[in-house]
Each structure stands twice: as structure tokens, then as C-alpha cells.
Amino acid sequence: MKNLKELFSNATCLAVLAVFFLFLGEVSQGQGYDTYGEVTTSINGGTNQVDNFSTNTYSILLSATKQSNIPVMIQARPSGTNLVELNLHFQRSLDNVNWDTIDPYLVTISATTNAGDAGYATLVTNLNVGGIPYLRLTKIGNTTSIGLATNVTFTYGIKR
């Protein structure tokens, strides 16, 4: 009878430990790699355009409170030429209230498509924000004198 009690007690301890380690494994897996729960297209192609030597203004918030890099994809179709040159200006903030005014981040997409090609120029990159939790896209400027950029698309990913 004593052996049966010990066996039952040991089996209970093993079952409790197995459940504990199973739970611990689930928790640690969730802490390994975050997934992008939100992929947002803020400027969605269509007919929007940035004329030559002009700038469009925006106020698109990118909340990076859970990551130090924000993956972004910028696309544009050249019109009147096969060259696209766009500058994207971002401001940063620690509290989502007070923003710097010097546009510290400048991302440039400069690409050439094949002549006569209806293709898009595409830039995929990471914005390294370090410890800054908030970015705001404020301007997209076209630096070319010979054509405009149409169907501009801006997409970014935020971890959940």
C-alpha cells in the first residue's frame, strides 16, 4: 500500500511538472518572435500623385512602442519619365504630443523603371527608431523636374 501511495504521489508531481513546463514553453514561445499584427497601407495608390518639384503634406502616425525598427514599403509609378525620386520626411516624439520640427528622418526612393514600362519603383526598408516610440510621416516631396510620381503607396508594419 505504501508503494502505491508513493507511486501515486510521484505520478501527481510529474503531472504537475509536465503541465508547468508545458505552460512555460507556451509563454517563452510568445516572447521569442513578435508577429506583425498590423500592416497598414496609409497612402493607397489610386490617383494620388506628387507633382514635380512639389511636396504633399501628411500626418500619419507610426506607433513603434514595441519595436526598434519599423518595416516600410514605398511605391510610386513614374509619369512623363521613367525616373522616380521621392523624399519622405518623418518627425519623432517621445510622448505623441511634442514633436521635433527638424524632420530628422529622411527616406529617399530613387529608382528607374524600364522605358515605356508601366511598372512601379519600390523601396522596402526598415526605419531604425531605436527607443523613440512615435514617428509621424509629415511630407513626401518629388525632387525631379521632368515628371510626376503617381499611385504613391506607403505601407508599414507594427508588432502587436
Image (cartoon, rainbow, N blue to C red):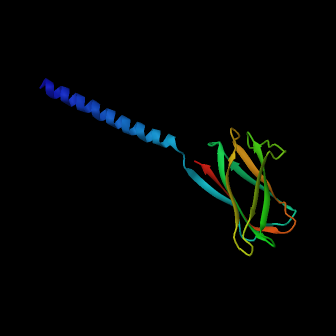
Quadrant in the picture for residue 8: top left
Identify which residue is drawn at 82% across, 47% down. Answer: 103
Quadrant in the picture for residue 128: top right
Closer to us: 5 or 66:
66
Residue 110 % position (x, y): 76, 59
Quadrant in the picture for residue 100: top right
**Left or right of residue 15, residue 60 in this image:** right
**Left or right of residue 14, residue 144 in this image:** right
Q: Is residue 26 above or below residue 75?
A: above
Quadrant of the rendering where the N terminus is positioned: top left
Looking at this view, name the residue that lies furthest to the left.
Answer: 1
Residue 86 % position (x, y): 79, 59
Identify which residue is drawn at 70% across, 43% down. Answer: 129
**Left or right of residue 12, residue 123 in this image:** right
Q: Is residue 50 above or below residue 134?
A: below
Count the marks: how many?
0
Identify which residue is drawn at 54% across, 49% down. Answer: 35
Q: Is residue 48 above or below residue 136?
A: below
Identify which residue is drawn at 26% across, 32% down. Answer: 12
Residue 144 % position (x, y): 85, 63
Q: Is residue 137 above or below residue 65?
A: below
Closer to us: 55 or 78:
78
